[in-house]
Amino acid sequence: MPKHFVYAIGAALVDTEISVSDHDLEQLGIEKGMMTLVDEARQAEITHYLADRLSSANHACGGSAGNSVIAASQFGAPTYMSCLVANDTDGDIYLADLEASGVAHGFDDERRAGTTGKCLVLITPDAERSMNTFLGLSETLSITEVNES
């Protein structure tokens, strides 16, 4: 019997959900309803504009691999996630969510310097989501992060 029935390899992204208006999207030059890959500077620009709303933002483990492995774990499957998280607050959030969901991972107390990936999920009153994703350390994910045990 295998140790893990589901083994995911993917981008560790913390979804940060923020309520915005259509005017905010316009001011930021963000196309409504689209997912856009952004660099760290652009994500910082968006975050700065929305700084007054960050305290009420919801933060959760995300990314398609992370979401899939958490769902499998909630159905009772033994699961494992290979990814990269930084030694930052978003890395703490990501790992805490994996652990709370029963997903095994290969991180101990030592994590890399850098930035954990983040997806700013901007939600307008009509519930449309516009996502601006910075992959962070996930851009460097390679075969060396695959744990074969």
Image (tube, rainbow, N blue to C red):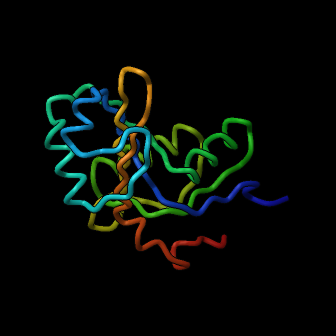
Q: Position of residue 68 (x, y in %)?
A: 63, 47
Q: Position of residue 51 (x, y in %)?
A: 15, 36
Position of the N terminus, as image quadrant, is: bottom right
Q: Residue furthest top?
A: 125
| Front position in the image: 64 or 100 | 64
Count all numbered tags in the image, as a single digit: 0
Position of the C terminus, as image quadrant, is: bottom right
Taking the image as shown, residue 87 lies to the left or right of residue 76, namely left
| Front position in the image: 51 or 100 | 51
Residue 115, compared with residue 63, is above or below; it is below
Residue 12, compared with residue 137, is above or below; it is above
Q: Position of residue 33 (x, y in %)?
A: 43, 39
Among the 4 quarters of the image, the one containing residue 25: top left
Q: Residue furthest right?
A: 1
What residue is rendered at 37% in x and 53% in y? 133
Among the 4 quarters of the image, the one containing residue 71: top right
Taking the image as shown, residue 4 lies to the left or right of residue 23, namely right
Q: Position of residue 80 (x, y in %)?
A: 62, 56
What residue is rendered at 52% in x and 72% in y? 145
Residue 132, compared with residue 134, is above or below; it is above
Taking the image as shown, residue 11 lies to the left or right of residue 18, namely right
Residue 95, compared with residue 1, is above or below; it is above
Taking the image as shown, residue 10 lies to the left or right of residue 125, namely right
What residue is rendered at 38% in x and 58% in y? 37
